[in-house]
Amino acid sequence: MSEIGRLILLGAPLGNPADASARLRDVLATADVVAAEDTRRLARLARDLDVTVEGRIVSYFEGNEERRTPELVDVLRAGHRVALVTDGGMPSVSDPGYRLVTAALDAGVPVTAAPGPSAVTTALALSGLPCDRFCFEGFLPRSPGARRARLRALATEPRTLVFFEAPHRIAAALTDLAAAFDADRPAALCRELTKTYEEVVRRPLGELADWAAREEPRGEITLVVGGAPQTPAERPDDDTLRARVADREAAGMSRRDAISDVATGYGLRRRDVYAVVHR
């Protein structure tokens, strides 16, 4: 046994056991302790994967993680390998795990991961919305007032937004989103990803809110919403452009760099600014 153990975060399948990695199977079979968000789900996953969990199984969920974390850190300090698995996806991402990760790091325990499926990136890829820049917001506040305040703060966010939401709150959340963001903002509701009844509904927020109120979607829901459209900056007049370039030259920039900097700042083509300066 090593002098100090290792915490391994396991990216579990979202629903389809066939998405489990070979490394996840190996860690489940060999870890000294497996901390599971739901021990019954872990038992089902192990059966589906034909894996025998030889290590000790303990529960680790929102209700007991504060008490369980120091116990697991003691196990890690004693030199044991602890695997942490949630009901689906990566621990710590809107699931138990963050508290244990920080405690292990504070104790000098190595932390690694067996990466696996992610509802966030899977929904992004399926949404048809821009994926190059995005913002993950997790679950919205449960109370209507706090939820609306959060959405007002996010209304001008230009990046694609990803939320988790509970089925019984999704219709109300979509209604508030349509009011705060604009009913025409594109969105995609992804539910039961990788499972038998997987469904992706791509509609503007207003239409999606009406659909959710009518259909009452069930299961695990990930919501992807397009970012706020960006209004092009107003083009300054020629005298202003020349003055901005002159200011940069006075500060020590070469004329070439000054023109490029002004063009970038105003979202203009360099050659257009060049033409103004040399006119």
Image: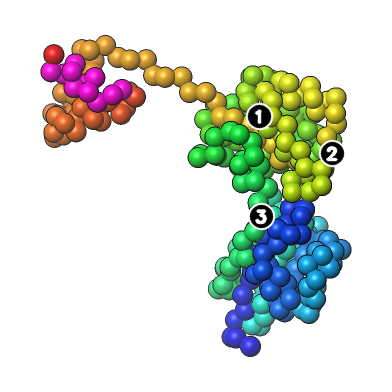
Is 47 situated left or right of 133 in this image?
Answer: right
Q: Which mark is residue 117?
A: 3
Where on the picture, by quarter, is residue 234? top left
Depth check: give the residue in front, 124 or 140: 124
Q: Up-down: is 124 above or below 267?
A: below
Residue drawn at (79%, 22%), measured in percent from left and top? Answer: 210
First reached walking from the N terminus: tag 1 or tag 3: 3
Circle 3 Cα neighbour tier, 10 Å, few/some/many (<14 / 14–19 / ≥20): many
Q: What's the residue type where badge 2 is placed? A: Arg
Check if residue 106 falls in the magenta segment.
no
Q: Which residues are magenta?
A: 268-278
Secondary structure beneath disc 2? Answer: loop
Q: Residue 25, percent across and down?
A: 71, 70
Q: Is residue 40 left or right of residue 111?
A: right
Residue 182: % across, % down: 64, 19
Tell me if residue 125 can be seen: yes
Task: Give the CA distance from mark 3 to mark 2.
Answer: 21 Å
Label 3 with label 2: CB-CB less than 8 Å? no
**Of the numbered discs in the image, which one, if any, rests on residue 187?**
1
> Residue 241, position in %: x, y?
23, 18
What SS does tag 3 mark?
loop
Q: Secondary structure at mark 1?
A: strand
**Residue at x 32% of width, y 27% of height:** 265
Label of residue 218 in the image: 2
**What residue sits 66% from the left and 54% below the top?**
117
Q: Residue at x 58, y 73 (%)?
A: 109
